[in-house]
Image (spheres, rainbow, N blue to C red):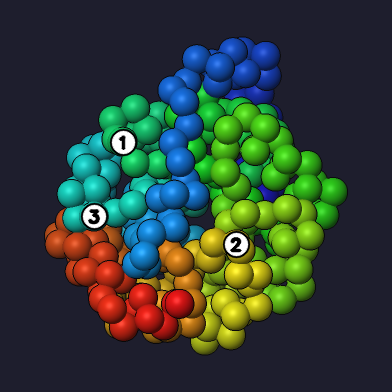
Amino acid sequence: MLSSVRADLSVRQAKVALEEVKRLADLARPPRDVISALSGPGVAVIAEIKRASPSKGHLADIADPVKLAEQYIAGGASMVSVLTEPSKFEGSMQDLKEVANAVEVPVLCKDFILTSYQLWEARAAGADAALLIVAALDQNALVALIERAQSIGLIPLVEVHDVDELDRAVAAGAQIIGINARNLHSLEISRESVVRLVPKVPDELITVAESGIRGPHDLLSYAYAGVDAVLVGQSLVKSGDPQAMVHELVTAGAHPSARHARS
């Protein structure tokens, strides 16, 4: 995956110089408040535009990502996540740009980000947040990318899978911790691993559960563990009625029992 990302990145860098990407980033709309969007009294829902995945292959034909984003927001989503990686996820930076220009909620750029060039690209496309995966970065790169993201108006969602990665993320200055239930090597889901890791996240940080949310029951199990938000993609794009499913998740996240469990 990372080799493919680097190859694709080198092509983009050859076509558009960094200085031009920075110029476009300076012209982008001001970043929206990601922290506030995920800090409400209930469990926030980040709804993802996702055409495919390495584990499941093609998931859904999404001809109009803006329309799907609008359905998510109508259902109550606090944020929209857009996959931009093309080879395994069938995403694009154009998807991100179209969605970010059309909606009023914060937008997350979800990709395998390895260099600051990609952060400038995301900001130029209108992103408010960007995914950084601890497992894909050494510590110096992680610290540098978190600092660069914050300096240009992006909030990093720093993804971890275990305690060691969580410790690295916290030490690097992460504000938002994403705990992915999917094992990057086997691609299997372990919701229990999320539940075990959530209590180890410092209280002042925002915690997002990623992967494995099939419906309200899974959201509530994560809520009881103490998460502030969930990121949902595959279940939504395959649901047949993404607006209704987002509404069900948001309703579950607003239930008094979920709020009590997180307090």
Q: Residue at x 40, y 50 (%)?
A: 37
Label disc, if present, on residue 205 of the rendered structure: 2
Q: Nearer the viewer, mark 1 or mark 2?
A: 2
Can you give x and y, in whole percent of width and height, for residue 155 in the image?
A: 57, 44
The quadrant of the image that shows the C terminus is: bottom left
Q: Tell me if label 3 and label 2 are in contact, CB under 8 Å.
A: no
User: Looking at the picture, does residue 22 appear above or below residue 74?
Assistant: above
Can you give x and y, in whole percent of width and height, for residue 32 in the image?
A: 44, 36
Q: Secondary structure at mark 3?
A: loop
Q: Residue at x 47, y 46 (%)?
A: 34
User: Looking at the picture, does residue 39 appear above or below residue 27?
Assistant: below
Label disc, if present, on residue 104 of the rendered structure: 1
- How many numbered discs? 3
Q: Is residue 25 visible?
A: yes
Q: Tell me if label 1 and label 3 are in contact, CB under 8 Å.
A: no
Q: Is residue 6 visible?
A: no
Q: Residue at x 54, y 61 (%)?
A: 206
**Position of 253 compared to 70: left or right?**
right
Label 1, label 2: how many angstroms apart (C-alpha)?
24 Å
Label 3, label 2: how many angstroms apart (C-alpha)?
23 Å
Which amino acid type corresponds to the residue marked 1 in the rendered image?
Answer: Glu
User: Looking at the picture, does residue 190 appear above or below residue 109?
Assistant: below
- Upstream in the sequence, badge 3 or badge 2? 3
Can you give x and y, in whole percent of width and height, for residue 7 in the image?
A: 66, 37
Q: Quadrant of residue 130?
A: top right
Which amino acid type corresponds to the residue marked 2 in the rendered image?
Answer: Leu
Label disc, if present, on residue 76 of the rendered structure: 3
Badge 1 density bin: few <14, some 14–19, many ≥20, Cα 10 Å: some
Label 1, label 3: how many angstroms apart (C-alpha)?
12 Å
Judging depth in this view, the residue of 25 and 37 nearest the camera is 37
